[in-house]
Amino acid sequence: MLVALVLLLLSFGSLPTSSGAQLPNQGQTKDPPIATNGQPFPWNHMRLPKTISPLHYDLSIHPNLTTLDFTGTVRIELDVHEDTNSIVLHSKKLHIFSVLLLAPEGVRPLQVLEYPRSHQLALLSDSMLIKGSKYEVQLEFAANLSDSFHGFYKSSYRTSSGEVRFMASTQFEATFARGAFPCFDEPAFKANFTIRITRERRHIAISNMPKVKTIELPGGLLEDHFDTSVEMSTYLVAYIVSDFLSVSKTTQHGVKISVYAVPEKIDQTAYALDAAVKLLDFYDDYFDIPYPLPKQDLAAIPDFQSGAMENWGLTTYRESGLLFDPDKSSVSDKLGITKVIAHELAHQWFGNLVTMEWWNDLWLNEGFAKFMEFVSLDITYPELQVDDFFLGKCFEAMEVDSLSSSHPVSHPVENPVQIQEMFDDVSYDKGACILNMLRDFLTPEAFEIGIIKYLKRFSYKNTVNSHLWESLTNVCTSDYLDEGRMKHREFCSNRDLSSGASKWYSGDELDVKTIMDTWTLQEGFPLVTVEVRGREVRLSQERYLKTDDPSLTEGFLWQIPLTYMTSVSNTVHRFLLKTKTDVLYLPEEVDWVKFNVDMSGYYMVHYAGEGWNSIIRLLQNNHTALTSNDRASIVQNVFQLVSVGKVRLDTALELSLYLSKETEIMAVTQGFGELVPLYKLMEKRDMADLEKQMKDYIVDLFRGLIDRQEWTDSGSVSERMLRSYLLLFACVRNYAPCVTKATQLFNKWKESDGNISLPVDVTMAVFMIGARTPEGWDFLLEKYRSSGQMSVKSRMKVAMAFSPLQDKLTWMMEQSLYGEVIKTQDLPDVVVTVSGNPHGYKMAWEFLRANWHALIKKFDLGSHSVSYMVTGVTNQYSTRDMLHEIRGFFGSLSEETGSEMRCIQQAYESVEDNIRWMDTNLPLLQAWLDKHKHRISHEDL
């Protein structure tokens, strides 16, 4: 969590959350497909035919961790829906060397055709497979363990004695199971899986289901047999062969929870184990559906591209996402680990039990899991104060959703690159934010009843958007009340839900689908303009879009659940805005009105006329009259409205003056989030004087709060995270008291050879100052190499990548690509941190260009890792020359090397927006800073 805030501070980017892709293709091939042997291939679509579906896979896998390859046999039981003489399924880079059809009339070989462009095999039969008959097909195959982070891939770690040990693990979402075994690799083809894994005696094997027996094979090998799984999609299959150790506990509902890690880090698993037990019990109760498997494993993988993966019964994580050292890890680490466990365990219901029909509705998985992180932690871990951070997710989503290259939450996709691109802030964060808005709209009780209905109705099935909306409409139906829990029956008997809509909109019956289609089937989000004239409140809506082409905002209309409060009433008033314009009437005239209370809605608000001036007066005189979420949303809204010409920059800066009195983390970090990017743009231009003025203004604004921070680990979670953030900012900005203290602490730590304990909350600031000298940087690297604490290594890595020592920055990026000292999984973070470094941004851009082909091979086209690097390295440029250079490079790529990726269009749009902003606002910024140079005196702080 803190690292995400740090990257906002250093480079205003966001961390990647999901993993890789493959080669582009269209839904239907342009030319008739030809198999590798020259014969016509019998299928010409990316999606598999529906003539045959799998019922059961019998899968045997033998990975060799010496030769780093594997062999396997899969027997698939098939259900034939239409007469056919071909079986089309997926296979990618597998050597297929025996294919048999096991038919009622006997066993016979099948001809095999391969069409690599679509990752498809066609198995041709001499005789027709008859509808309604059952068949089995058996394929033997072999391949190398993947060098990337997906499919069945190799991972390694170094012991404290320097020995390198290998393991093999899987990552199949979204389209990578086909690289591990031939299969029907689409989410709607659910089946049961029975898995057997051959291993050496020194290793263990784990999979989705518990092991039922182990048999000895000739040559000293062992074969582990796992129980048959429930019906599930191929992307959820998982197996690991390693030398991991584990710790275990049992939930109140009788599920065995185990956490696996490399032997030397098993002592960092206790927190994750307790969290997983607590959270699985919570979900078991909340969803009113028992977790259907006998066990749930959580495994920390040394090499892992995304944050985590929800494989049913065997969730996998980055080590930094699972391992916690009470003495060395921060509260930020604790919050991040708890959230990622909550996310993956929520998927056991949302995604695994009920799965989207196709990847266009990925948000039904990811938006829900992201949303449930906050719902579950708010109840199970109230001390983590998770509500303080939900708003940030909505702001991150709006950042990409404000570009014309955004996409609807539910969006057609066909090929693997398009599918991987769906794993973005729109599917995760916007999905979570519109669910939060819907929950507030329906009431939490009605929302809970509706999602339980959805999960029960569609267990072990696949769904589309409309299935969710149906379940959330008329939630108190008799069929649910017959089986629902007592508290829901009481809720329904005490409330006429059909009239619940009246609090929003009188006259129409509540239609969840019609409302929510406006949020999921069109991209972007609304800007609501509010103008108060006496008791009359005039409302209008339009699309918020960063563009100089007004036509791009036309044709958009949302049904917006508006909330508002006024200076004379703390009551939250509600109104469903269904039209382009409307009028509200207040009972009496007011001094101010605040719409989107607590920012429960996914929209921005512009206060026309005297509206912004009344908000500014309120914040300056009595800012706590509004909640911290309201204050944070006002800060975000006013600066974002500058970008689209709705508000003058000097108005936004006048509003920012109130921040000298702010103490709450969300409002403070949002203040930084809007002000820091202004000087980050200047760092990449030759305007040192204005850049210094802007930096000095921000330091002066927060000086009082910075000076009140103690260099300890005391306080609540939010107070401690705010301390880390403020001290880091102060040190990076060379605020003398901070630099002096951090230098003293670093020297003391270095003199003890790293043995004294620093307060965890201040280590990032201390390391950042220490990394400025060659001796300090080298010492940090030495400790990075020897440390087994992932959270400590993460802070060291960021500090080293923000050093002014340019030769060190080059070395770090090169080493991250090589993967020996710094894991290649960390390369995107390293490159983006260097790009936010005023001494390193040119080097990061050069590195991205020079190593492009290696990067897309390792991380894959369409992956969030590639997108994160592309946008992170380019989004602070603001000159036409640089835009020309960026266009020149990405424009030279072919489709096979990424020219069609959405992130490239996002990069162009971000730089264009920066250019417009600088052209329009630089003179205003200079004038305002000159005028207010001495406005904030130390007495005010």
Image (tube, rainbow, N blue to C red):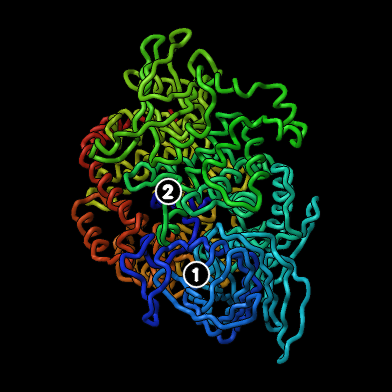
Amino acid bearing label 2: His
Between residue 897 and residue 754, name the one nearer to us. 897
Residue 233 image-quadrant placement: bottom right
Q: Is residue 863 visible?
A: yes
Label 2 residue SS = loop
Q: Is residue 310 above or below residue 534?
A: below
User: Which of the two labelled residues, at mark 1 and mark 2, occupies the earlier sequence position?
Assistant: 1
Q: Residue at x 48, y 65 (%)?
A: 826
The structure residue drawn at horizontal position 58% and vertical position 48%, both measured from the top left corner, is: 369
What residue does disc 2 label? Answer: 411
How far from the left and from the top, in percent, is residue 163?
60, 82
- Specify the label residue 628 is tagged with: none
Quadrant in which the C terminus is drawn: top left
Residue 455 figure quarter: top right
Q: Which mark is residue 88?
A: 1
Asked if residue 796 shows in the view, the reply is no
The three-letter amino acid code for the residue at tag 1 is: Val
Which residue lies most toward the bottom here? Answer: 219
